[in-house]
Image: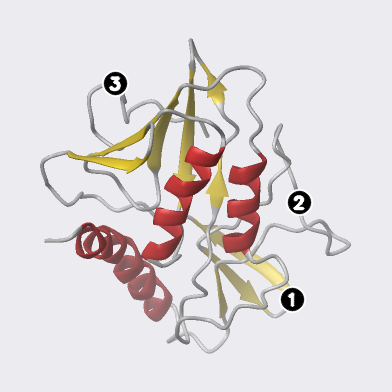
Amino acid sequence: MTLRELLEHIRALFTDQLRFQIEARLDDPDLRVVAEPALRQANGAIVREGRLQLPMRIDLMVRSGQQVVDSLEFTTDQMVAFEPIEVDWAEGYRVRIGPFQWENCPVVVRGVGPETDWRPLIGWFEKWFDEEEWRPPLDPDLQGVIHFLSDPKPGEGTAKLTVDLGTVVTDAFEELLDAIEETGAKEALVGQVEGNDPRINTN
């Protein structure tokens, strides 16, 4: 199995569940389901938070007329099992990938410090967040957008991130690894691999 095929399996665990949750609410004619909405202020302006000042999306919003009756987030209850993969992604930059959830992906970045320029990561996020929603939806249900990126939580020569990849295609995951490399990092640990405890959530 190639890395791309593996990523497709991991992604499908979440996107299949999201489609199921959408379809389960379509039978009520009094409700309107909004998939993957960006959080906005009352005036319509996008909400930005944290040191990186990034926006975020939630999985589903349910409306009755103009009133929001529910906001929903989902997590998968299983992960695709596989032996960790190690890849020399670029010269001087190594990536290790273990099992992870598409919607709750922990990443440890090594070889960074307090002065690290995170703009490559911010640019990657903004591209796939698609604030103006210029990108055509993947299908009637899914927008193909990212939902959340935490601020880097610094350690000794490291930073910990949590990424909710939402419904982005696997190209976006590979571009995430590229963006991390552009920060000057020497290694990225994704998911359940030695040196990355996925129980630590930086949300």
Q: Nearer the viewer, mark 1 or mark 2?
A: 2
The disc at residue 28 is: none
Is residue 102 placed above or below 85 in the rendered structure?
below
- Residue at label 3? 195
Q: CA distance from mark 1 to mark 2?
A: 20 Å
What's the residue type where badge 2 is placed? Val
**Could you say where residue 68 lies in the image, as x and y percent from the top left?**
66, 66
> Which residue corresponds to the image point at 44% horizontal and 65% vertical from the top-left?
167
Question: What is the secondary structure assignment of the residue under circle 3?
Answer: loop
> Which residue corresponds to the image point at 21% horizontal and 65% vertical from the top-left?
5
What's the residue type where badge 3 is placed? Gly
- Residue at label 2? 47
Q: Nearer the viewer, residue 33 or 3?
A: 3
**Quadrant of the rendered structure where residue 57 is?**
bottom right
**Could you say where residue 62 lies in the image, as x and y percent from the top left?**
57, 70
Category of crowding for the residue at label 3, using alpha-carbon neighbours closer than 10 angstroms: few (below 14), some (14–19), many (at least 20): few
- Residue at label 1? 66
Does residue 180 appear to the left or right of 77 in the view shown? right
Category of crowding for the residue at label 2, using alpha-carbon neighbours closer than 10 angstroms: few (below 14), some (14–19), many (at least 20): some
The quarter of the rendered structure image containing the N terminus is bottom left
First in sequence, mark 1 or 2: give its number: 2
Q: Nearer the viewer, residue 183 or 7?
A: 183
**Could you say where residue 27 lies in the image, as x and y percent from the top left?**
42, 87
Q: CA distance from mark 2 to mark 3?
A: 33 Å
First in sequence, mark 1 or 3: give its number: 1
Disc 1 vs disc 3: Cβ atoms closer than 8 Å?
no
Question: What is the secondary structure assignment of the residue under circle 2?
Answer: loop
Q: CA distance from mark 1 to mark 3?
A: 47 Å
Does residue 195 appear to the left or right of 103 in the view shown? left
What's the residue type where badge 1 is placed? Gln
> Which residue corresponds to the image point at 63% horizontal and 26% vertical from the top-left?
116
